[in-house]
Image: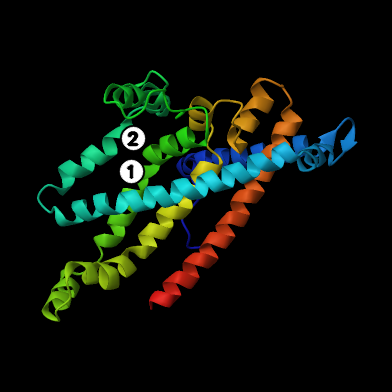
Amino acid sequence: MNTGEPFSPSKALMILPVLILLGLFFGSVIYLFSNAFTAGDGFSMKYFQQIIDRPDYIVVFIRTIIASVIVALLAVILSYPIALLLWRADKWRNMLLIIVLVPWLVSLVVRTYGWIVLLGTKGFINSMLIWIGVIEDPLSLMFNDLGVIIGLTHVLIPFAVISILSSLLQIENNLEEASRVLGAGPVQTFRYIVLPLSLPGAFTALIVIYLACIGAIVTPILLGGLSQKFVGSQIYQEVMYAFNMNKAAAWSICLLALSFLSLVILKKIERRVLRGQE
């Protein structure tokens, strides 16, 4: 005898949004693959061959990977002192956390334009350096890899702070107290207790930030320009300027493959490092 509850229209309405989201996701993926592997009237690897055969396109992939690794490492390293401060500041933690998260409430385009004001040839940084006599001519801080790295690091630091802080909050206070009782100083306590126990959060931040960087579009375009191409800006250029949807789809699949391969490698590194800490 069937004792389950009868299927009602209200349950169907609850499932409908999930089905719509799944349909949009798989539909977009199918459309992406169909465009990437189609040329003329049939199946073709033409657009992938065009990407592989051009050395400047290979440089785009290499530049994207190197910049993403640098941004991920910088964001994690710079976030550690902030996360430690939030971890120690019990009474002020919520207020300081709000200050860290406020930039996320501002549009990415607005934040990036803020860096244009700072990094431009007549921007604040160059003007100050010239005024105090450190340099005579403006430094090239924009429309190159340096500008993109600075912008992406600033954008993604809040996520790294939250990720590391979540691991720090799981550390029991008695571990630090035991370390001090045994004669360990602050540096030794951080090296042998705090750092190993917070590594899971650091690796999570590292992986997510890296994956966010290799697909970034807005910041590389505004701070790097279309001449300093990254994979994301290359896809944007194929769609908006060349109107070549098939080639843009091929680039997108290459980006998906790069993301998946990078994720596998980073997870293996994470497991090996964390296993060594046990």
**What residue occupies the far top of the structure in this picture?**
122
Which numbered disc covers residue 221? none
Quarter of the image where the C terminus is located: bottom left
Secondary structure of the residue carrying numbered label 2: helix
The vertical placement of 164 against 224, above or below, is: below
Q: Is residue 227 visible?
A: yes
Q: Residue at x 82, y 36 (%)?
A: 38
Q: Residue at x 33, y 21 (%)?
A: 127
Could you classify mark 2 by the number of other residues whose Cα lies within 10 Å: few (under 14), some (14-19), or many (20 or more)? Answer: few
Image marks 2 and 1: residues in contact by CB distance under 8 Å: yes
The vertical placement of 138 against 200, above or below, is: above
**What residue occupies the far bottom of the structure in this picture?**
182
State which quadrant residue 204 falls in.
bottom left
Q: Is residue 32 visible?
A: no
Which residue is denoted by mark 1 in the rendering?
Answer: 158
**What residue occupies the far right of the structure in this picture?**
41
Relative horizontal placement of residue 83, taking residue 239 as reference (left or right): left
Which residue is denoted by mark 2 in the rendering?
Answer: 104
Residue 46 on image: x %, y %: 84, 38
The vertical placement of 236 against 215, above or below, is: above
Relative horizontal placement of residue 226, taking residue 11 as reference (left or right): right
Q: Residue flagged by tag 1: what amino acid is it?
A: Pro
Q: Nearer the viewer, residue 252 or 111?
A: 111
Secondary structure of the residue carrying numbered label 1: helix
Residue 256 on image: x %, y %: 63, 46
Q: Nearer the viewer, residue 140 or 13?
A: 140
Q: Residue at x 25, y 52 (%)?
A: 81
Q: Nearer the viewer, residue 7 or 36?
A: 36
Q: Residue flagged by tag 2: what amino acid is it?
A: Trp
The vertical placement of 254 against 132, above or below, is: below
Number of numbered markers: 2
Q: Residue at x 90, y 31 (%)?
A: 41
